[in-house]
Image (tube, helix red, strand yellow):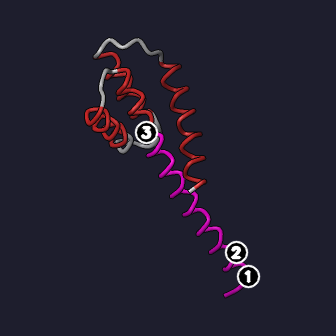
Amino acid sequence: MTTFDKREEGFEKRFALDEESRFKAVARRNKKLGLWAAQLLGLSGEAAEAYAKEVVVADLQEAGDEDVFRKLRGDFDAKSVDVSDHQIRRNMDEFLAQASAEVKAG
């Protein structure tokens, strides 16, 4: 194996590890987001946990964050919860930063 091949293999492993960490952070972010939204929707206990799981699953519909945003926006609108689009997106960003730090910390 040449030095170039070893270097390429190292980059591939690093990319795979970074993607796995990102996936874990986004899933953790979505759970935090779901629990936050559940509280605003008046859910608690097992109902809040179930709702948080729904938010995690909603992220699997398409690439990016729009599927999660649409789920939350739709649920807030259906229950007449007054939360702005800006607040939803800000919490998405804040929870992702927290979740990323938690995943990095192990």
Q: Position of residue 3 (x, y in %)?
A: 73, 82
Q: Earlier in the sequence, mark 1 or mark 3?
A: 1
Q: Which residue is mark 1?
A: 3
Disc 1 to disc 3, C-alpha distance? 41 Å
Identity of the residue furthest to the front in this view: 45
Q: Residue at x 38, y 33 (%)?
A: 34
Viewer-side label of 3, 2: 3
Viewer-side label of 1, 3: 3
Q: Position of residue 44 (x, y in %)?
A: 30, 29
Q: Secondary structure at mark 1?
A: helix
State yes or no: discs 1 and 2 in contact (Cβ < 8 Å): yes
Q: Residue at x 31, y 23 (%)?
A: 75
Corner quadrant of residue 94: top right
**Which stretch did the figure color magenta?**
1-29
Q: Residues within 10 Å of mark 2 (few under 14, many from 20)?
A: few
Identify which amino acid the numbered label 3 is placed on.
Asn
Corner quadrant of residue 93: top right
Q: Tell me: residue 6, above or below residue 51.
A: below
Q: Position of residue 49 (x, y in %)?
A: 31, 38
Identify which amino acid the numbered label 2 is placed on.
Arg
Q: Main secondary structure of the magenta part?
A: helix
Q: Residues within 10 Å of mark 1 (few under 14, many from 20)?
A: few
For this rendering, which residue is in front, 6 or 14? Answer: 14
Q: Residue at x 29, y 33 (%)?
A: 45
Q: Position of residue 106 (x, y in %)?
A: 56, 57
Q: Which residue is mark 3?
A: 30
Q: Secondary structure at mark 3?
A: helix
For this rendering, which residue is in front, 42 or 67? Answer: 42
Q: Is residue 95 left or right of residue 40?
A: right
* Disc marking residue 68: none
Q: Is residue 80 left or right of residue 64?
A: left
* Disc marking residue 7: 2
